[in-house]
């Protein structure tokens, strides 16, 4: 991740239709994911340049694992209202056993001759330390794209064009939290994990090629009374190419046909039906 740079005028978030999407648009929230849950295990993984001897790496790893397990079990005990010296002593012993078991497992696997490294023990210790550091990291990440017309992003994150792409502007106070990802062209904001108030300003919503009219209508209506107006677009393919282009959505046409009642069609024929029945009941 490079140093913060001036972001583009718009950042784009692709999503399929879901309750979380409505939270993002209507409640103006962003969801900051745990980096350890990412599909790519290399994303945000710390790289440890270990200059300690193996026995010292073992001590560091043991201490980190023991501290984390102790903190997690202590939080669980507190939520269950378990208190007292016996509980604390049990948590401490369990934390120590977890750390000891981890080191025993690493030493055992280090004897595997299939590892093609000079020092398997050192390599495994480094891997475990990196994983431990990542689990102790309490910040979440939300990623964005730099353009709304990326076919791959629409396929993978826009539910194969059944979803939407939300466009945000970046207020000056949010710029320092944005960092360009070196291998992509998307950006990310760091914050606490989970749903948080968005530091960005929602400016536009672009609907995918396959997005249903009912989804479009629902989102347009949901954002109708927003304090700052939002523009609506729909994505279309450029004829004869694989390129995409956004066009303004005709919200008036959308509102003219939705919402509807299926029985209203039947009701339009009620008078005719009643007249037919009356004619049959009172023949001339």
Image: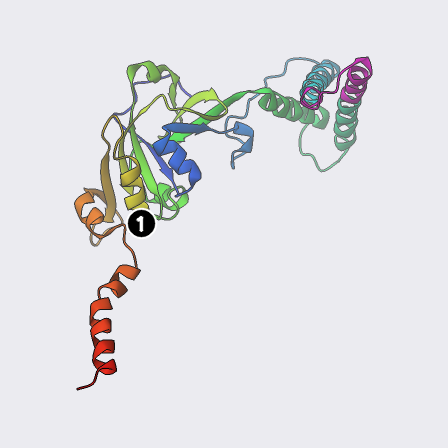
Q: Which residue range is magenta in the image?
A: 76-96
Q: Can residue 176 be spotted in the picture?
A: yes
Split into 4 quadrants, where in the image is the N terminus?
Answer: top left
Give the image quarter of residue 2.
Answer: top left
- Provide the residue designation for mark 1: 214
For the point 67% across and 13% down, which residue is it?
52
Q: Nearer the viewer, residue 87 or 179?
A: 87
Q: Is residue 59 magenta?
A: no
In the rendering, at what x and y percent does residue 87 appear? 79, 18
For the point 35% across and 33% down, which residue is it?
25
In the rendering, at what x and y percent does residue 109 appear? 75, 32
Q: Would residue 131 appear left or right of 275 to someone viewing this image? A: right
Give the image quarter of residue 271.
Answer: bottom left
Could you tell me what secondary structure mostly forms the magenta stretch?
helix
Split into 4 quadrants, where in the image is the C terminus?
Answer: bottom left
Q: Would residue 45 appear left or right of 201 to someone viewing this image? A: right
Q: Tell me which colouring the rendered structure shows.
A: rainbow
Give the image quarter of residue 117.
Answer: top right
Q: Nearer the viewer, residue 119 or 183?
A: 183
Q: Is residue 84 magenta?
A: yes
Q: Nearer the viewer, residue 134 or 270?
A: 270
Q: Can residue 211 be spotted in the picture?
A: no
Q: Secondary structure at mark 1?
A: helix
In the rendering, at what x and y percent does residue 23 appear? 40, 33
- In this view, 107 is above or below 155: above
- In this view, 151 is above or below 226: below
Count of number-bearing discs:
1
For the point 32% across and 38% down, which residue is it?
165
């Amino acid at each position: 991740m490079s140093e913060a740079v001036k972001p583009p005028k718009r950042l784009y978030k692709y999503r399929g239709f879901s309750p979380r999407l409505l939270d993002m648009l209507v409640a103006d929230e962003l969801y900051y994911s745990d980096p350890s849950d990412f599909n790519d295990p290399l994303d945000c993984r710390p790289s440890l340049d270990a200059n300690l001897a193996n026995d010292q790496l073992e001590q560091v790893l043991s201490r980190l694992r023991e501290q984390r397990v102790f903190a997690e079990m202590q939080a669980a005990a507190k939520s269950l209202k378990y208190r007292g010296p016996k509980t604390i002593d049990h948590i401490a012993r369990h934390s120590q056993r977890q750390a000891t078991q981890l080191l025993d497992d690493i030493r055992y696997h280090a004897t595997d001759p299939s590892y093609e490294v000079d020092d398997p023990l050192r390599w495994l210790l480094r891997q475990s330390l990196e994983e431990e550091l990542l689990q102790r990291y309490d910040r979440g990440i939300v990623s964005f794209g730099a353009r709304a017309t990326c076919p791959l992003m629409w396929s993978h994150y826009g539910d194969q064009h059944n979803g939407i792409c939300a466009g945000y502007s970046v207020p000056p106070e949010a710029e320092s939290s944005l960092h360009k990802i070196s291998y992509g062209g998307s950006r990310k904001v760091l914050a606490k994990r989970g749903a948080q108030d968005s530091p960005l300003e929602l400016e536009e919503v672009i609907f995918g090629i396959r997005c249903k009219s009912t989804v479009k209508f629902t989102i347009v209506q949901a954002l109708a009374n927003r304090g700052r107006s939002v523009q609506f677009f729909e994505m279309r393919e450029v004829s004869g190419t694989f390129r995409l282009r956004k066009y303004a959505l005709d919200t008036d046409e959308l509102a003219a046909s939705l919402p509807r009642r299926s029985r209203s069609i039947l009701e339009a024929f009620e008078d005719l039906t009643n007249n037919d029945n009356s004619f049959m009941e009172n023949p001339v």
